């Protein structure tokens, strides 16, 4: 998309656990970033107008800086996605995505109920031509300078090889367009390196990936993820969700271990006190909320989903990411990759 | 088993990457432990007699302290388990397990090719009555004082709900007998807490576990493992292997992050130098090799499998664990649990 064109992003002001405060702060920070970097982008809120206006005023933003689409209702974290879709047509989630689908905006961002954002997005935006199932990809840090994209990170728990193949294609394109790696290395998450390893789905997927034009490096194991063996780690959403949540719990686990160690003696406490800034410095980049949301790949639009606990910084990053996904036309690349042009008719032998 | 009875353990002297050196050192340390604690146990080696005798002499042990069963051949880490089983009948693995199966010993311990130890054990020892598939359980550290048993940790990649149920039963018994928890909390590893969450196998397994007399606490998520939400974490071996290997890579990842941080500046280097002992202290218990091998549950015998890189300490712990599993008669409990006595005939109404 041309740099001169304005990317319009709708932010669900009622999504996260600290809505609309964090949403408003995130949007203000995002707009400052856009202005400072001469990026043509605009953020509109969807949600309860009065609450949004009051939060904007509280943080000293002019109400005129942000268009507001009023929505009475809110999909809560406890709502069953399918039920919310049928019964809460006036929710910020429904109305925001509907506006995106109707062309009022190029992207939609929410830190709300993940399952509901996924299903509402799929139902209201539809799928890109050639995509069987939209998927969620999440970046994990690695020991290398570059992160790795885990895909599917939880959207689809029962997957066929064809779905895993599509995740690999979409993940590859996302990493290439967003991080600029020309030939992202695609690894299939499995229990061993050999082609014959793993469950039935893994073995069949290996064949599909091997025959593709992706940069498929073969099977990778659980231990290879954090050392950055692949740029795209392909798995079903059951495995992906478990690995992601396990990884997220590493920081909690480490903090508990450090605290327990410090509590053992005064000497330990002093040592850990000295070590704390070093630890904090070393572990920068392990705080997943800083990554700022994950894209729902494969829907016919741009839908960025964030953690319910998203900080203003996370929300800012989600908005920035949305702008990038739109600007870099990730969806067009996905459609082209999954719908290769028909082969030109072969010349007949004379 | 009575304390007066001698538990005889066969150690595969050719198994690990540092065989027979680490094996001999581990066996010497284990025998010292047994003697110091008045435990009636004996370790016999199986493998190349000359190499074993030479290692024993090197470490100052009397050759008479350890019976040696000679075996010419060795199953290597590269051997395909099924091929090795057919072609290497003279291997330390085959002969050692055969001796165990024939009653010469109560247990077998190896740090060799994991897949080969598993399949040789299953084929030579057979399964406990009522067990469809033997399984591997692995302890993971938690933020609590007690570890959690991940089962299956990689033995079975395609599982039916019935298999997952049996893993839960065997894991529960193992934790109860080995760690002394009266009612181990069993959690089903899944992508959400609700009963309807997860893939088809998970949903059906939930029903089986709910109807069982296990202390089933419901679904747990990836983030719950390290905080010790359950004493037994049930999953198929595909997920279990990936989680286990991912967990094992955490230390590597942390070390790399700490080193990278230290390399950034002299100040950082000094700080990390000061922090190092604290870190080491805090992370004690995260080194999985110290746990000393994992049992293959469900085989009609006791087979303890260790990491190829097992240290002498790990091998010592594997031998100690083998003695305990035999002494505590874990297999009898498994057989009883999976073969409940027929219900007594109901009294007829008068």
Image: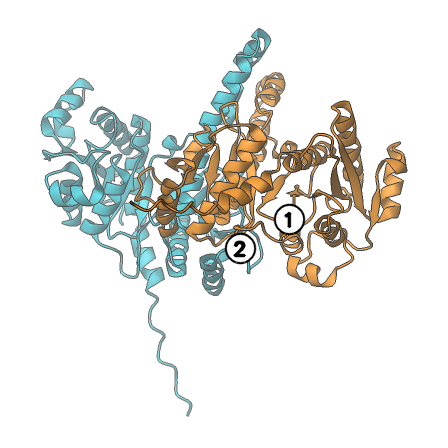
Chain colours: A cyan, B orange
Quadrant, the N terminus of chain B: top right
Q: Pointer 2 indicates a residue of which chain? A: A
Q: Residue furthest bottom?
A: A350
Is residue B307 left or right of A224 when viewed as pictured? right
Mark number displayed over residue B114: 1
Mark 1 residue crowding within 10 angstroms, few (<14) / some (14–19) / many (20+): some
Residue B329 is at least partly visible in this image: yes
Are the residues tagged 1 and 2 within 8 Å (C-beta)? no
Number of callouts: 2
Image point 28% across, 36% down: which residue? Answer: A319
Are marks 1 and 2 in one subunit? Answer: no
Mark number displayed over residue A1: none
Q: Where, by quadrant of the figure, is residue B326 drawn?
A: top right
Q: Secondary structure at mark 1?
A: helix
Q: Residue furthest front?
A: B350
Please tell me whether residue A278 is drawn above or below residue B287 in the rendered image. above
Image point 31% across, 55% down: which residue? Answer: A133
Residue A232 is at least partly visible in this image: no
Q: Residue furthest top?
A: A266
Q: Position of residue B278 (x, y in %)?
A: 59, 18
> Which numbered disc, 1 or 2, marks the residue closer to the eye?
1
Q: Pointer 1 indicates a residue of which chain? A: B
Of B194 and B134, the residue lying toward us: B134
Quadrant, the C terminus of chain B: top left
Question: Which residue is identified by label 2?
Answer: A217
Of B13 and B205, the residue lying toward us: B205
Q: Position of residue A49 (x, y in %)?
A: 10, 29
Is residue A298 left or right of A212 when viewed as pictured? left
Q: CA distance from mark 1 to mark 2?
A: 24 Å
Q: Position of residue B115 (x, y in %)?
A: 62, 52
Please tell me whether residue A315 is drawn above or below residue B281 in the rendered image. below
Of B216 and A292, the residue lying toward us: B216
């Amino acid at each position: 998309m041309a740099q001169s064109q304005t990317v319009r992003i709708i932010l669900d002001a009622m999504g996260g656990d600290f809505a609309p405060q964090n949403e408003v702060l995130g949007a203000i920070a995002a707009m400052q970033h856009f202005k400072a970097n001469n990026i043509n982008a605009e953020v509109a809120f969807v949600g309860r107008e009065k609450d949004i206006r009051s939060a904007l005023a509280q943080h000293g933003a002019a109400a005129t800086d942000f268009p507001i689409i009023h929505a009475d209702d809110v999909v809560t974290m406890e709502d069953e996605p399918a039920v919310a879709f049928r019964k809460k047509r006036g929710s910020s989630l429904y109305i925001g995505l509907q506006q995106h689908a109707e062309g009022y905006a190029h992207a939609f961002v929410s830190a709300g109920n993940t399952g509901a954002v996924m299903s509402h997005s799929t139902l209201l935006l539809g799928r890109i031509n050639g995509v069987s199932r939209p998927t969620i990809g999440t970046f994990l840090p690695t020991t290398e300078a570059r992160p790795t994209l885990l895909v599917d990170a939880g959207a689809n728990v029962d997957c066929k090889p064809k779905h895993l193949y599509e995740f690999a294609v979409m993940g590859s394109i996302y990493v290439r367009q967003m991080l600029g790696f020309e030939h992202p290395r695609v690894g299939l998450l499995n229990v061993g390196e050999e082609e014959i390893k793993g469950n039935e789905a893994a073995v069949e997927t290996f064949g599909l990936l091997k025959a593709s034009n992706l940069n498929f490096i073969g099977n990778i194991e659980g231990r290879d993820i954090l050392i950055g063996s692949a740029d795209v780690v392909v798995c079903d959403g059951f495995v992906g969700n478990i690995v992601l949540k396990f990884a997220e719990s590493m920081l909690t686990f480490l903090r508990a271990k450090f605290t327990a160690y410090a509590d053992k003696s005064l000497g330990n406490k002093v040592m850990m006190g000295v070590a704390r800034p070093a630890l904090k410095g070393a572990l920068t980049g392990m705080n997943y909320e800083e990554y700022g949301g994950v894209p729902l790949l494969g829907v016919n639009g741009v839908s960025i989903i964030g953690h319910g606990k998203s900080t203003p910084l996370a929300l800012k990053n989600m908005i920035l990411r949305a702008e990038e996904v739109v600007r870099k036309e990730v969806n067009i690349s996905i459609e082209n990759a999954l719908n290769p042009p028909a082969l030109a008719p072969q010349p007949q032998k004379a």
